[in-house]
Image (cartoon, rainbow, N blue to C red):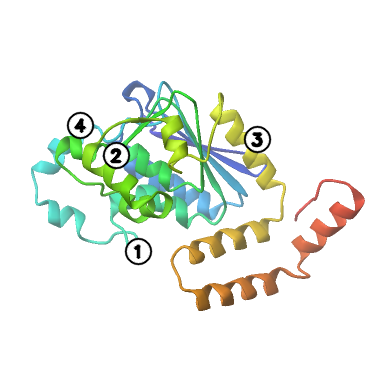
Amino acid sequence: MARVSVDYSDHVAHVRLTRADKMNAMDPAMIDAIIAAGQEVAASPARAVVISGEGKGFCAGLDVASFGAMAGGDPREAMLPRTHGDTNRWQEVSLVWRRVGVPVIAALHGVVYGAGFQLSLGADIRIAAPDTRFSVMEMKWGLVPDMGGMVLLPRIARSDVVRLLTYTARPIPAAQAESWGLVTMIDADPLAAAQALAADIAGRSPSAMRAAKRLIERAESEGRQEVLMAESAEQADLIGGADQMETIAAQMQGRAAVFR
């Protein structure tokens, strides 16, 4: 059974978790399918990405049966080798979306727990339904977040919030998640809102959008001197380029831009 589907329309990639009968809980096959979807989208000409989950929830976390499968071997042999650059297989589930060169928007509903929460953190923007619930679930099972959460979560939330969520595994409602910066916005129809936002992004300069994502990634991890130089270099490459000239022409003529 397919775990993830990828479709393209109007320059937007639509990635859907399709294990609805299991609340999109991640088993090994789904982990591989999510990574493959991210790699496919990264290599595509898509200008924006929407990730959503079918059924009653975005993702309920790891499939509990997966714990049993891991318990039989040496966890260090399974987890310490780097399989995707600086990550292992589990970490790449969230971080592959940061490697995608265009904005990624997560449409969230129902439960966003554990592995699903960490997957959502890999998106640039998170839009949640009002009744969505979030949890860093790992402590419930005597574990710590290990799917990129400790790289992504401290960038997004205050230290005390990160600690509370990690120490307690306590589910929080969407309104609390939004106030803590874990959710970008709340919408009654998060998928429609995500698709509308993706369409807006896809209508803007593709080269400028990719440059903006690269620049933000560097701004979050590098020092002042490096970021200032990166700003200048990215801007110099954009000025006078085909995408920028078409953007200006479209603005002056009051029409939608058409990028080649």
Q: Quadrant of residue 82?
A: bottom left
* Kind of element beneath mark 2: loop
Q: CA distance from mark 2 to mark 3?
A: 29 Å
Which quarter of the figure is the N terminus placed in? Answer: top left
User: Residue 136's mark?
Assistant: 2
Mark in the foreground, 3 or 1: 3
Height in image: 192 above or below 78? above
Q: CA distance from mark 4 to mark 3?
A: 35 Å
**Mark 2 vs 3: CB contact within 8 A:** no
User: Residue 196's mark?
Assistant: 3
Height in image: 245 above or below 154? below
Q: CA distance from mark 4 to mark 1?
A: 27 Å
User: Residue 64's mark?
Assistant: 4
| In this rendering, position of residue 234 left or right of residue 32 | right
Q: Earlier in the sequence, mark 4 or mark 3?
A: 4
Q: Earlier in the sequence, mark 3 or mark 1?
A: 1
Q: Amino acid at mark 2?
A: Val
The x and y percentages for residue 48 are 60, 46
Q: CA distance from mark 3 to mark 1?
A: 33 Å
The x and y percentages for residue 182 are 43, 42
**Mark 3 vs 1: CB contact within 8 A:** no
| In this rendering, position of residue 45 left or right of residue 56 | right
Q: Which residue is mark 1?
A: 85
The x and y percentages for residue 170 are 27, 33
Q: Amino acid at mark 1?
A: Gly
Mark in the foreground, 2 or 3: 2
